Amino acid sequence: MNLKHILILVLLVSFISCDKTTEKEVKKDTFVEDNYTKTEVDIEMRDGVKLHTTIYSPKDKSQEYPILMQRTPYSSRPYGKGKMRTSIGPNAQLMKDKYIIVYQDVRGRWLSEGVYDNMRAYIPNKKENESDEVSDTYDTIDWLVKNVENNNGKVGTWGISYPGHYATVSTIDAHPALKAASPQACIGDFFFDDFHHNGAFLLSYFRAISLFGTYKDTPTDSSWYSFPRMNTQDQYQFFLDKGPLKNLNEYFQYDKLDISTAERKEKIDDFFWKEIVEHPNYDSVWQSKGIIQHMDKVPSSVATMIVGGWFDAEDLYGPLETYKGIEKHGKDNYNTLVFGPWDHGGWSRNSTRNAVGNYYFGDSISLKYQSEVESKFFNHFLKGKGDKNTGLPEAYVYNTGKKEWNSYESWPPKTATKETWFLSENQELTSSKKGAKGIQFISDVKRPVPYSEDIKTVFTPRKYMTDDQRFAARRPDVLVFETDVLTEDYTLAGDILANLKVATTGTAADWIVKVIDVHPSDAKENNKQMQNHLKMSNYHLMVRSEVMRGRFRNSFEKPEPFKPNQKTDVNIKLQDVFHTFKKGHKLQIQVQSTWFPLIDLNPQTYVDNIYKADEKDFKTQTHTVFTDSNIQFTVLK
């Protein structure tokens, strides 16, 4: 056989191999088409508005199936006869277990009628024909169990992020057919989730605002919103050059955007942006939109599994507070918590490798959760006995320091205790108070502390949650306090409270506290995708961080200025963690006053509404942190 024949043979074998691979991939991708039929219906609500609903039903009609439903503002597409998703349901296992899978466009979104309201307020005592998301969910479930063939009368709901919020909503004043709900990364309250953190505006999310605030009052199967163009790869410089928040108003007027919607009528402004600008405080508008305030209305007939990620930049507050709210009010409820080493929605991905940014946690973590936890939960309550004996723990949580799962009968674990550490001189974090001396730093409004050293633009930032914080620790406007090298493991399991004693030469300031795991110098890389300029040696892993807009230190409803140079208490609740600082590591606290452009820049002089501040209001100030400030940890021995 000559070389020519060998080459032909190799090409032929390669072609056959590729053809087989393609054929195999096609078969995999057509599972839904092969095993389900799709129908699209418009379900009428009690007030006459019709919501577009897509139903995937198993072709096998020899048995009855439970219904699994997701309500979403992000579209139930693909629309049209013969057009189907290639995967449906919470995970591949449940898809293959066969459920009736339902997706619905919520009111005012995509092909559903009505006008959308971002986090539409719950109406506790509805009058006839009054509606909210609770009643829309109830009416939808009622129609489904009465009209969809071969359903067994049991319904479950799930969703991640905004759809997770609608899963929470489904549990309130729930329909009797609803047996199980899994709110995942669920929004709890927009003054503390996503677009605000303790009243500080998440400037880094500004491009996502038009997704929720562009007006629409007629059904459509195509996008009616457009995202502002930054025309740069340097978002830090972009926002610094823009200056005060009011200079961003132009990006939320329709005539400034490249969109072709013809019917705009008198609605010329983005209504969500307008809501943010006109309601800078935690007033009745934001309070009415919160859903965690209504966890007392979740009946014991609905089993709940709340899911989240320890490094979720968008929605960490929501799932933790949803779980705690149900626990507080629902003593007889089946209510469980699952938290893993994930960023936003990471548990739903099919990749074997699990990492957040530069930090690697292991393999198959998400896949095991899907098959061994999520599927088990829904199968038990919708197909099985439903007697609450699922075999799953009350709290199934991942220790992000030891990189292992643990099970507990409650969260935080009952054996956890509180320990207090003080921010002492010489960059020390000590177990006892050593005086009350002030440590000063200059907060320059022209050179705010970046939240990331990356030069890039992102739609919604996520990676920074595990970023190496050495770049910040080496700045003069970031105060650092750390323990000696730990001689034994030290595990945090629960919330963190920073009790700061501060002063400022101005009348306004933000305060940011970060909890850092400082790795030893001989630590080895275990993430092949780590950024080239970094090493695991001395890596400063951010375990938790939070901001408090200083004006809200005493009340989110009634802001107040600081008195210049007067020592003042600022208390910041940091969300729960489950992390072991290993022997040989150090625990570090960083305190700073800017975190740009993750949050907007505080003028550092008090104005009634920061969204309307002028350039002249922004002043560089000197801040002081006193050494009787302390951090209270929830510690598991």
Image: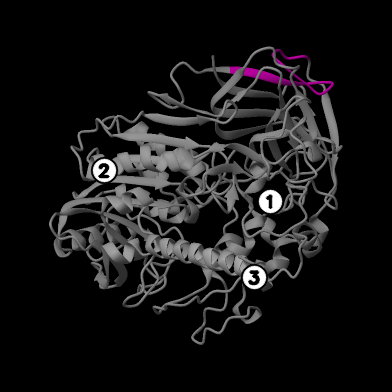
> Which comes before the other along the chain, label 3 or label 2?
3
For the residues marked 1 and 3, what is the alpha-carbon distance in whole angstroms? 61 Å
Left-right relation of 444 to 45 = right
For the residues marked 3 and 2, what is the alpha-carbon distance in whole angstroms? 58 Å
Residue pointed to by mark 2: 379
**Residue 40: x and y, percent?**
28, 72
Q: Is residue 226 above or below residue 153?
A: below
Residue at image coords 64%, 67%: 2
Label 1 amino acid? Leu
> Which comes before the other along the chain, label 1 or label 3?
3
Quadrant position of residue 486: top right
**Residue 39: x and y, percent?**
26, 71
Which secondary structure lies at badge 2?
helix
Residue 421, magenta (yes or no): yes
For the residues marked 1 and 2, what is the alpha-carbon distance in whole angstroms? 40 Å
Residue pointed to by mark 3: 4
Q: Which residues are magenta?
A: 419-434
Residue 107, magenta (yes or no): no
Which quarter of the rendering shows the N terminus?
bottom right
Residue pointed to by mark 1: 598
Left-right relation of 430 to 314 = right
**Label 1: few (<14), some (14–19) or many (≥20) C-alpha neighbours in 10 Å:** many
> Which comes before the other along the chain, label 1 or label 2?
2
Callouts 1 and 2 close, C-beta under 8 Å: no
Label 3 amino acid? Lys
Label 2 amino acid? Asn
**Closer to the observer: label 3 or label 2?**
3
Nearest to the observer: residue 348 or residue 104: 348
Which secondary structure lies at badge 3?
helix
